[in-house]
Amino acid sequence: KPIKVSRAAQTHAGTYYFADGEGWINASDLSTTDNRIEAVQKVLNEKYNNQERISVYVKQLDTGKIAAINDEKSMYAASVAKLGVLYYAQERLSHKKLSLSDEYQYTSAVNGFPGAYDPDGSGKISKMPDDKNYSLENLLKAVAQNSDNVATNILGYYVANQYDHSFQKSVDKASATSWNMDKKELTAKAAGTLMESVYRQNGDIINYLSSTDYDGERISKNIDVPVAHKIGDAYDFKHDVAIVYTDSPFILSIFTDKEGYDKITSIADDVYGILR
């Protein structure tokens, strides 16, 4: 943590500094840079590195430092892949190519193109096409806050033009990987990298991801600062990717296979305990 040093003393045991509120501290125990990420890596190595079904990627946004285990292991990403749609929509909003008031019709075609999610999955919008118009704002909120499959499909069909070359190029660049909306296989690192890109956009999407149906579980369960996150669940896979808004915000991406929500919470608590 940051400290303020007001005095120095040379002793036979070395140099000591007087830190306000802390007392005298040996110079060897101080650093001019934030070195907490090293402690994060140590905890990950000691507690989770031998567990092949867990992938973790942590990045401090101020320092750019990273801690990780198995972060390039590919898994089925489930709803985490929806981050690509959210990022692309925000990019087009930021460039004034879209407006939150734009509306799109829910026809049968939106659930039938390659890469579309099963409409019977998560979300509150009708599972059957109702030919109604839905605003871009409501669709983005539905994806970010409720992980709505149908809303994702509507956005994928109209806004991302069925995941065309423009979408692919944009999201690949933002995630530093190939973001395949058909296979939906990703790494914790790729998901964390795209979440960082969403953070850098500083748009409406961040606000939507900060108030979701899933705030009482996984990464955000025990964290007492704001968290913007996107969850993913399918089969044995359970994931969560977040921006944790400490004084020095950080990205935390956790992918798991055959593990429970409590495991994700435990990892998040360990990381937050150091970077809080």
Image (cartoon, grey):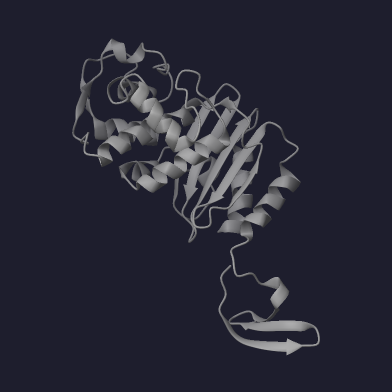
Q: Please state the total of marks drawn on the protein image.
A: 0
Q: Horizontal and vertical percent for residue 58?
A: 58, 47
Position of 172 with respect to 47 (left or right) is: left
Q: Is residue 222 above or below residue 31?
A: above
Question: Which residue appears at 75% of the width and 47% of the height?
Answer: 46
Position of 254 with respect to 167 (left or right) is: right
Q: Is residue 180 above or below residue 239?
A: above
Q: Horizontal and vertical percent for residue 263?
A: 64, 39
Q: Quadrant of the N terminus?
A: bottom right
Position of 103 with respect to 180 (left or right) is: left
Instruction: Give the quadrant of residue 48.
Output: top right
Nearer to me, 43 or 225: 43
Q: Is residue 208 above or below residue 116?
A: below
Q: Residue furthest right?
A: 12
Question: Which residue appears at 35% of the width and 33% of the height?
Answer: 88
Q: Is residue 148 visible?
A: no
Q: Horizontal and vertical percent for residue 138?
A: 27, 33
Instruction: Give the quadrant of residue 39.
Output: bottom right
Q: Is residue 60 visible?
A: yes
Q: Horizontal and vertical percent for residue 118?
A: 42, 16
Q: Is residue 248 above or below residue 3?
A: above
Position of 120 with respect to 57 (left or right) is: left
Question: Which residue appears at 51% of the width and 36% of the height?
Answer: 191
Q: Quadrant of the C terminus?
A: bottom right
Instruction: Give the quadrant of residue 206.
Output: top left
